């Protein structure tokens, strides 16, 4: 979820009622320098790149203002997975560490426990870290450099 400040949400725990088949779109971490400059990647590396791109496509947020067509590529993939007999798919969270799971049929899961509270998002916090060799620096009076390697900010 990507709630905005002031939006409410609830939390619940579900149990899967039967064995299910999930397409795991996550292929693991990749080295961008290697990916960009490898002139002859192996078939295994190409597969990894494609699955990571698919995972990123599913995790990309679509805003309320976006056209419905923004969903089409991932909808087509999800329908293809479903047609092949899969019960759902998993992809890396685009917001934080973790995995998102989508079930094509909600009846394969049952509610175990729903929390008795509704939560309202009070604020959002962002932590940024500079990419090595691309950080901003400022020259101090003594001639040394002070590097800006992290930025932290949060909503009001």
Image (tube, rainbow, N blue to C red):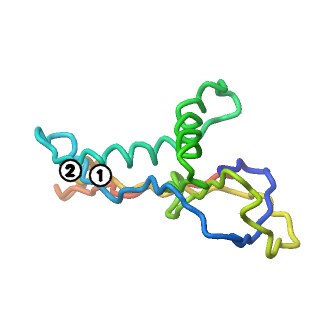
7, 141: nearer the viewer: 7
Among all residues in the image, which is located at the extreme right?
Answer: 116
Q: Position of residue 6 (x, y in %)?
A: 79, 51
Query: Viewed as shown, does residue 48 lie left or right of 125?
Result: left
49, 89: nearer the viewer: 89
Give me the residue at 51% from left, 51% from top. 94
Give me the residue at 59% from left, 58% from top. 101
Q: Position of residue 40 (x, y in %)?
A: 11, 41
Q: Which mark is residue 133?
A: 2
As helix, strand or loop, the secondary structure at mark 2 comes to loop
Quadrant of the rendered image containing residue 76: top right
Q: Position of residue 11 (x, y in %)?
A: 76, 66
Marks 2 and 1, Cα distance to the nearest angstrom? 6 Å
Badge 1 is on which residue?
131
As helix, strand or loop, the secondary structure at mark 1 comes to loop
Q: Evaluate if marks 2 and 1 touch, with contact meaning CB atoms under 8 Å apart.
A: yes
């Amino acid at each position: 979820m990507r709630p905005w400040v002031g939006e409410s949400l609830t939390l619940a725990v579900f149990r899967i009622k039967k064995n299910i088949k999930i397409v795991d779109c996550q292929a693991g971490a990749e080295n961008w320098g290697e990916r960009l400059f490898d002139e002859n990647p192996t078939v295994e590396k190409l597969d990894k790149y494609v699955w990571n791109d698919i995972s990123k496509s599913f995790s990309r947020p679509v805003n309320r203002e976006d056209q419905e067509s923004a969903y089409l590529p991932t909808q087509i993939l999800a329908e293809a997975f479903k047609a092949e007999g899969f019960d759902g798919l998993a992809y890396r969270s685009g917001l934080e560490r973790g995995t998102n799971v989508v079930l094509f049929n909600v009846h394969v899961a049952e509610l175990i426990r729903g929390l008795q509270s509704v939560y309202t998002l009070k604020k959002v916090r962002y932590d940024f870290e500079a990419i090595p060799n691309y950080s901003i620096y400022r020259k101090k009076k003594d001639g040394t450099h002070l590097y800006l390697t992290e930025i932290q900010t949060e909503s009001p």
